[in-house]
Amino acid sequence: MDVSLIGVPINYGCDKDGAQHGPEKLREKKIVEVIKKYNHSIYDLGNLYVPKVSDSEKYAFHDKMKYLKPIVEVNTNLAHQVYSALASGNFPFVIGGDHSLGLGSISGASRYYTNLAVVWIDAHGDINTSETSPSGNVHGMPLAAAMGVGCDSLTDVYYKGVKVKPENVFIVGARDLDEGEIQLAKEKNLNLYTMADIKDRGIEAVIAEINQRLQKNEVEAVHVSFDMDALDSELVPGTGTPVCDGMSIAEVKLLFKALMDTKLVKSMDLVELNTRLDKDDITAEVAIELVDWTFNLIA
Ligand SMILES: [Mn+2]
């Protein structure tokens, strides 16, 4: 596989210092060499440009969404990078940075693939809008925007229109959903697998159902968007919004294996590694362990 590594050093979506250093930390931890071990060709395209905006300007572009303008700019450029990578036959691997970048990744992948599915592995739903978000942090909104829900400046990133149909959206590992998110998930009938579902039914049963639905929906490609906070907070001190009672490393590995086995995964994000909050690089090393696992599975 030819892999395009795309760094997105953004923290405007989480409004927390440290998330912007994820790409440099992962490179320091030898992410390129780890991927190369499995005979992939890897092209490190470097980091996207993130414009400087001061703290005092966070609400200058929208009164309910922080740093909207630079977030839209970065995501538009990311979308085109992802699209270009796919068009040249590469696997775009996007490393963050906060989860607002998921919108750019999905937008790029969905321009290339007509019937795209998204597996969003996260403690949170990230399906807020400016109206439902308690914080105004855009990293809680990208998946809603990708479904065409929210304000135009986000839903129209890269091109106008819905990027992923709700029936093709799979949220796995959620355990901290806001009221508006619960409502939207019901309204759109999203494939939502909370931690309670995973504990009750087992990750294997959840995986089987996801596989069935991907087949039934005749999905052409899957974009996997993995937030480090999907893992239990005890395992990942270095993430901005940790939540207890999360996934184990073994559960994430099983899920990744099942997804890679479908041969449908064509692009992926790894986000919300916060180097400022991390302790002794524990979280960075977990991230590298999962990268190692994933690229060993990809043919
Ligand atoms: Mn997230």
Image: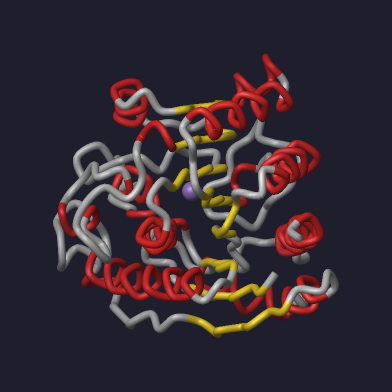
Q: Quadrant of residue 262?
A: top right
Q: How is the image coloured?
A: secondary structure
Please determine whether, in this image, residue 105 is positioned above or below residue 81.
Answer: above
Q: Is residue 267 left or right of residue 135?
A: right
Q: Is residue 158 visible?
A: yes
Q: Is residue 264 left or right of residue 292?
A: left
Q: Residue furthest top?
A: 200
Instruction: Please give the count of numbered marks on the rendered protein.
Output: 0
Which residue is painted at 77% across and 77% down in the image? 30
Please determine whether, in this image, residue 284 is positioned above or below residue 155.
Answer: below
User: Which of the image's four quarters has the N terminus?
Assistant: bottom right
Q: Nearer the viewer, residue 251 or 259?
A: 259
Which residue is painted at 76% across and 44% down in the image? 253
| Image spot of residue 183 (x, y percent) | 31, 23
| Image spot of residue 87 (x, y percent) | 46, 72
User: Which of the image's four quarters has the C terminus?
Assistant: bottom right
Which residue is painted at 39% across and 31% down in the image? 167
Q: Is residue 14 visible?
A: no
| Image spot of residue 264 (x, y percent) | 60, 49
Please determine whether, in this image, residue 250 is positioned above or below residue 285.
Answer: above
Please determine whether, in this image, residue 230 is positioned above or below residue 57.
Answer: above
Q: Quadrant of residue 238?
A: bottom right
Q: Nearer the viewer, residue 7 or 259?
A: 259
Q: Nearer the viewer, residue 135 or 267?
A: 267
Q: Nearer the viewer, residue 59 or 273?
A: 273
Which residue is painted at 50% across and 35% down in the image? 171
| Image spot of residue 248 (x, y percent) | 75, 38
Q: Residue furthest right?
A: 37
